Amino acid sequence: MIIHNRQLISKYNGKKGGRPKSTPFDRIELPDINLVILTPNQYGSLVEKYGYEFIKKALSILENWLAHGGKSSEKYLGKNHYAHFRSDGWVVNAVRRSD
């Protein structure tokens, strides 16, 4: 560990000791979901907040956008997608409109 500008920095954290980096082993494996990256804790909290069927639809919408979204979705490939599931986010609103 390194102390830099009075902040503790570890090789397991991001720059300036921020959010821990996730490893490929931390992501969940779901059938038909290959591009959406969530940790098991994130997936559990989303299911608890929205319900299983809602998250299943939201994951398929986000997966489809990542696969066919073109240049607008390219910058999100390979990154964690938990922020896309905000209660006022486009993924959640798309599921609500489809019901």
Image (cartoon, helix red, strand yellow):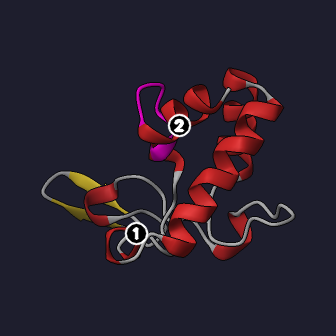
Q: Amino acid at mark 2?
A: Ala
Classify the position of the C terminus by image quarter: top right
Q: Tag 2's secondary structure? A: helix
The reply to whether residue 98 is visible in this rendering is yes
Taking depth in this image into account, of 33 and 5 the one nearest to the observer is 33
Q: Amino acid at mark 1?
A: Ser
Taking depth in this image into account, of 49 and 89 the one nearest to the observer is 89
Q: Quadrant of residue 62?
A: bottom right
Residue at x 40%, y 69% (from the top left corner): 73
> Marks 1 and 2: CB-CB under 8 Å?
no
Q: Which mark is residue 94?
A: 2
Would residue 80 be counted in the magenta stretch?
A: no
69 horizontally vs 71: left or right = right
The reply to whether residue 37 is visible in this rendering is no
Which of disc 2 and disc 1 is earlier in sequence? 1
Above or below, 71 relative to 27: below
Taking depth in this image into account, of 27 and 68 the one nearest to the observer is 68
Q: Which mark is residue 93?
A: none
Q: Tag 1's secondary structure? A: helix
The magenta segment: 84-89
Residue 45 image point, x, y percent: 68, 32
- Label 1 vs label 2: CA separation? 16 Å
Above or below, 13 relative to 41: below
Residue 66 image point, x, y percent: 52, 68
Residue 39 image point, x, y percent: 67, 54
Classify the position of the N terminus by image quarter: bottom left
Q: Quadrant of residue 51?
A: top right
Question: Dominant secondary structure of the magenta stretch?
Answer: loop
Residue 18 image point, x, y percent: 35, 53
Residue on which the image places disc 1:
73
Residue at x 74%, y 65% (from the top left corner): 33
Q: Circle 2: is it few (<14), some (14-19), or many (20+) Cα within 10 Å?
A: some
